[in-house]
């Protein structure tokens, strides 16, 4: 019998619905495990034990009363702390939100609750989702469960590590330039960034508004599909939300859908260029060969402007971030630093200097600079135009293929502290994930093997056309059916099972 | 002394009459206790997003159509950044290089002469909150009730040439927005605000002089006074051989002077960029046509019609079209009585009725005397049932009690006496009672006829038909 | 050099960030390196390309003009570092602070 903490969300929901196990039992098992393991890993910023048990009890009661169980009945979920939760402290990984207790739930969170999910707590992250290693959290780093001397990736590092270590069945993360997919790859779990507008951004603390998306991380593709089904869909509270019906994404993960005959997998050679770890290249190419075994036709794809994506991304994202973070001024909520006699501007400057970490300040500075009169045309406006070219590349590529397959990250999990001194080197960790956000496309990372040198997980990235989540999920689920990478657990987490 | 010409452009902020704010469901009402009209978006809580108010867009489009603007089928919102405690997000959502409407004009009359001022643009934006500087204290207080209330900014070309013209232009805007029902136009409460850009140049010059921006003028009177002051000040500066400094100046109502805002340490840089949270605003032809057909007749057109079709004097027509509700009321009076003479109705509405309403500061929409009731009263006078003099008293009673004119006339026995034998009896009585005056009249003092008429009117409680009495008296005294 | 210390200082003032001299030195160096990297965009031919402001082309949806849930003044001020008389309290504002 699989221990509760390694069961998938699909299994838990079915068993809770059938009253084979209670939501309270599942929740307790996870809370116990968090208590035992998380001191070391640092995934959770806040564990809402009482709240979770109360939700679980409510789910059990509703099912006992004959209510139809939700899609995620009794599934223990962790939330990246960028997602606003009513009455539960929300920090965005930043000191500047010290003491902030939101008076409302975001839409994705509310939909999770409606689906019967049990929210265990809030997960660690790079401050304001700015980072690729979770070392930029104001509250300490997260350790990679596969090798605790290494980072889990970021910015949704707490989400990825918690899922990998069995500290929740599913986590929500956010992805602005790869912040779901890159940590999923580095931590050996599945991570899905939906099409921009597929999941509401209402209640998601903004980093870069035109790029941010919420999405699930889980150990199986099917769990990502289930979770997406629960949280996706039009939201009148988000003007950029797409008004399109939500399909039964889980249908893309069935055995019947696993035959990939006729499906065209595009492989852009631009994503296998210098800087790619040779072991990762080997594993990703092997994974693509596996897709061919499953019936898919592998075709070349060309994304010539992807070499500009990193520069484009860091202009667009930092410009928007510098604007989105202007509201943290110590007036209505959050940190205020003021010495006697300080005037208003000094209060602003001290509060923001003390509240924001180094990377956030760097990006605010870059973004502010890029928007300044005299620089706008050369930087921001030009980046928006190159962004259009990047999007156009994808439109053309998807005319001749159904999904695009690439590595998720050029490198496996690196050691804590290895890249903190060189911001550009850190930015390069996102090189393969960024263009998907710029183009607004769905992208998924699925585990595709381990490096032989140090047994670190590797991810295959699958990109689809707008609203092509079902296709991406179908390919990933078929791959997962044909492989067993996802059945392995981090040795440390396995040993520590309470 | 060089003769100078003033060059003035106005930027008017018009608060749109919506229930909720431009980007959220918080109340857009005026005057609640501080911070009672807020929601998470108004406070710029993390994770909140703007969703555009349909009615605010409709209001902006109505103004754009009424001023003949070219409406952009696709317009965009942009973020304008600056730090200030009354600006919760650290940026204002406004429109920048693609506003909803451009190239319009405002027509108005300056001393009876038609004037047209070109509009550069109309754009939509959100209002800021309010900070109160606590006298003597080391702190200020911030109320966000007003933050997020929808505004349109109406920007004119520098076409205005005098302070008085600027004030008339502003009155025309106020009249227009009230006609359109998109703003109450209340300058004291700040629902209509304006900044003025003022420069002067030697008459005949084409190039503009250096301009200053005037802020903080809360009434038509102050707009005019502040511009007059500024024109005089700039004239003095130039006459003394100095240069006008480009600056923003605050009008001090109490002192009747303006002073510059302290010079900024660095130029402001608003860092505009397209608002990523709001897709472009698309306006369809059908929406524009639907709004166009819903527009009311505009003030100048209505005034012209009242003159041409109803034969009113320019003064009466202007008075009766000053407010859409007054014009509507007036037209209802005219329509209510088939025999209701438009000019006579104009006198009643523009005279007695407005006087009563004005005294009570009551809007005409809340007049206790309905248009039909007033039409009835006018008909009673026209038909000779009551005298015009009595009718004024009757109107006062109607206004106070809400009764109909017929009820009052019947109860108080105010029917006009036109019966020949009755009038003859009254006149004979008056003559018999005043033998001395009769003697003087017959001796050639014609002016005494008025005395006899007055006595006859007094005898009948004012109900005697004045012309008939006149005739009878002349006959009897002859 | 793509960016000078003075520009870094001016940018920090715009962004309301108090920076130490060391931070300014470090940021000048880092931002310069990043901006040099960004230079590659200058070579891209973007003639006639419309800037892409949104990831998905949508038209702005409109909301009916109706009141939603309002916060009570207590809730509105609950997270405020300082408040008084139902208002957010800030250091004294002088008119020129705005837009500085």
Image: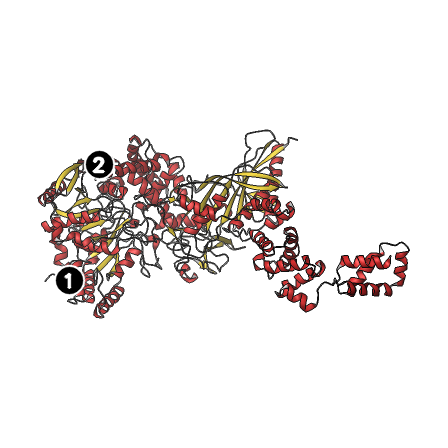
Mark 2 Cα shell of 10 Å, populated few (<14), some (14-19), many (≥20): many
Secondary structure under tag 1 reads helix
Q: Where does the C terminus of chain B fall, quadrant-wise?
A: bottom right
Residue tagged by mark 2? A303
Q: Which residue is mark 1?
A: A4
Residue C22 can be seen in this image: no
Name the subunit of mark 2. A
Residue A332's x, y, as percent? Answer: 41, 55
Tags 1 and 2 in contact by the CB under 8 Å rule? no
In percent of the image, x 39 and y 40: which residue is there? C11
Q: Nearer the viewer, mark 1 or mark 2?
A: 2
* Foreground of the two, C72 or B293: B293
Report in which chain the residue with disc 1 lies: A
Q: Image check: B361 left or right of A162?
A: right
Please give left or right for residue A283 compared with residue A440 in the image: left
Compare residues C72 and A291 and report the one nearer the observer: A291
């Amino acid at each position: 019998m699989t221990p509760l903490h390694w069961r998938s969300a699909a299994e838990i929901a079915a068993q809770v619905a059938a009253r084979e196990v209670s939501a309270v039992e599942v929740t307790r098992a996870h809370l116990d495990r968090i208590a035992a393991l998380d001191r070391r890993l640092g995934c959770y910023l806040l564990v809402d034990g009482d709240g979770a048990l109360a939700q679980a009890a409510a789910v059990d009661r509703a099912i006992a009363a004959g209510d139809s169980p939700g899609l995620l009945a009794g599934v223990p979920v962790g939330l990246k702390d960028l997602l606003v939760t009513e009455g539960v402290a929300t920090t965005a990984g930043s000191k500047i939100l010290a003491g902030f207790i939101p008076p409302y739930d975001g839409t994705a969170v509310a939909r999770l609750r409606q689906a019967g999910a049990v929210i265990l707590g809030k997960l660690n992250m790079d401050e304001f989702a700015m980072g690729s290693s979770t070392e930029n959290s104001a509250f300490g780093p997260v350790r990679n469960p596969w090798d605790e001397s290494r980072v889990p990736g970021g910015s949704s590092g707490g989400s990825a590590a918690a899922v990998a270590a069995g500290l929740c069945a599913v986590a929500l993360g956010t992805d602005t330039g790869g912040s779901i997919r890159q940590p999923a790859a580095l931590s050996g779990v599945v991570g899905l960034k939906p099409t921009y507008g597929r999941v509401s951004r209402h209640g998601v603390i903004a980093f870069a508004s035109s790029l941010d998306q919420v999405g699930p991380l889980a150990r199986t593709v099917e769990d990502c599909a289930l979770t997406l089904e629960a949280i996706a869909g039009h939201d009148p509270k988000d003007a950029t939300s797409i008004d399109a019906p939500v399909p039964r994404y889980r249908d893309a993960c069935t055995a019947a859908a696993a035959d990939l005959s006729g499906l065209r997998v595009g492989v852009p050679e631009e994503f296998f260029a210098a800087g790619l770890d040779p072991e990762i290249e080997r594993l990703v190419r092997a994974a693509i060969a596996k897709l061919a075994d499953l019936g898919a036709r592998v075709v070349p794809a060309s994304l010539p402007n992807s070499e500009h994506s990193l520069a484009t991304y860091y202009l667009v994202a930092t410009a928007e971030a510098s604007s989105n973070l202007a509201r943290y001024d110590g007036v209505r909520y959050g940190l205020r630093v003021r010495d006697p006699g300080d005037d208003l501007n000094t209060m602003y400057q001290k509060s923001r200097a003390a509240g924001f970490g180094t990377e956030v300040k760097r990006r605010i500075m870059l973004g502010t600079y890029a928007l300044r009169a005299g620089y706008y045309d050369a930087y921001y406006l030009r980046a928006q135009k190159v962004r259009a070219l990047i999007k156009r590349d994808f439109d053309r590529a998807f005319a001749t293929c159904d999904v695009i397959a690439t590595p998720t990250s050029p490198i496996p999990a690196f050691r804590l502290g290895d890249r903190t001194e060189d911001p550009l080197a850190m930015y390069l960790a996102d090189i393969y994930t960024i263009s998907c956000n710029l183009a607004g496309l769905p992208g998924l990372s699925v585990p595709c093997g381990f490096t032989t040198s140090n047994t670190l997980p590797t991810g295959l990235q699958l990109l689809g056309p707008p609203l092509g989540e079902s296709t991406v999920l179908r390919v990933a689920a078929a791959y997962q059916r044909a492989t067993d990478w996802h059945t392995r657990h981090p040795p440390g987490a396995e040993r520590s099972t309470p | 002394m060089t003769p100078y010409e003033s060059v003035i452009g106005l930027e008017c902020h018009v608060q749109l009459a919506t229930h909720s704010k431009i980007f959220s469901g918080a109340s857009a009402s005026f005057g609640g206790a501080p911070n009672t009209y807020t929601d998470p978006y108004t406070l710029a809580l993390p994770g909140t997003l703007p969703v555009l108010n349909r009615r605010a867009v409709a209001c902006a489009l109505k103004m754009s159509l009424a001023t003949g603007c070219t409406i952009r089928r696709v317009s965009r919102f942009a973020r304008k950044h600056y730090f200030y405690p009354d600006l919760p997000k650290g940026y204002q959502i406004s429109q920048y290089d693609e506003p909803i409407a451009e190239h319009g004009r405002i027509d108005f009359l300056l001393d009876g002469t038609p004037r047209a001022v070109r509009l550069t643009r109309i754009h939509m934006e959100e209002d800021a909150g309010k900070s109160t500087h606590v006298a003597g204290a080391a702190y200020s207080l911030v109320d966000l009730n007003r933050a997020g209330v929808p505004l349109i900014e109406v920007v004119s070309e520098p076409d205005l040439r005098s302070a008085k013209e600027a004030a008339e232009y502003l009155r025309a805007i106020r009249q227009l927005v009230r006609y359109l029902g998109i703003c109450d136009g209340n300058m004291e409460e700040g629902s209509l605000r304006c900044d003025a850009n003022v420069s002067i140049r030697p008459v005949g010059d084409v190039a503009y002089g250096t301009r200053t921006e005037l802020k903080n003028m809360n009434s038509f009177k102050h707009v005019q006074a502040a511009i007059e002051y500024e024109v005089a000040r700039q004239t003095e500066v130039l006459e003394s051989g100095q240069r006008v400094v480009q600056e923003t100046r605050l009008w001090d109502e109490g002192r009747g002077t303006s002073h510059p805002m302290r010079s900024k340490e660095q130029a402001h840089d608003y860092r505009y960029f397209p608002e990523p949270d709001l897709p472009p605003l698309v306006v369809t032809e059908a929406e524009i046509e639907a709004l166009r057909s819903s527009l009311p007749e505009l003030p100048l057109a209505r005034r012209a019609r009242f003159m041409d079709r109803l034969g009113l004097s320019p003064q009466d027509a202007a008075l009766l079209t000053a407010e859409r509700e007054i014009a509507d009321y007036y037209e209802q009076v005219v329509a209510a009585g088939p025999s209701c003479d438009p000019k006579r109705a104009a006198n009643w509405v523009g005279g007695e009725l407005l006087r009563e309403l004005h005294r009570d500061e009551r809007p005409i929409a809340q007049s206790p005397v309905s248009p039909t009731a007033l039409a009835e009263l006018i008909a009673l006078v026209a038909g000779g049932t009551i005298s015009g003099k009595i009718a004024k008293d009757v109107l006062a009673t109607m206004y106070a009690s809400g009764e109909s004119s017929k009820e009052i006339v019947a109860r108080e026995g105010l029917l006009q006496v036109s019966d020949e034998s009755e009038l003859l009896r009254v006149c004979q009585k008056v003559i018999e009672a005043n033998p001395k005056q009769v003697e003087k009249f017959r001796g050639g003092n014609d002016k005494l006829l008025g005395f006899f008429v007055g006595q006859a009117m007094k005898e009948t409680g004012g109900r005697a038909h004045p012309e008939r009495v006149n005739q009878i008296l002349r006959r009897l005294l002859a | 050099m793509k960016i000078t210390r003075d520009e870094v200082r001016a940018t920090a003032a715009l962004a309301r960030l108090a920076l130490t001299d060391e931070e300014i030195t470090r940021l000048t160096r880092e931002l310069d390196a990043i901006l040099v990297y960004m230079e590659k965009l200058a070579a891209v031919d973007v003639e006639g390309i419309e800037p892409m402001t949104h990831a998905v082309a949508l038209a702005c949806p409109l909301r009916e003009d109706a009141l939603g849930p309002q916060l009570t003044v207590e809730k509105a001020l609950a997270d405020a570092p300082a408040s008084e008389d139902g208002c957010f309290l800030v250091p004294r504002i002088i008119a020129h602070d705005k837009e500085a």
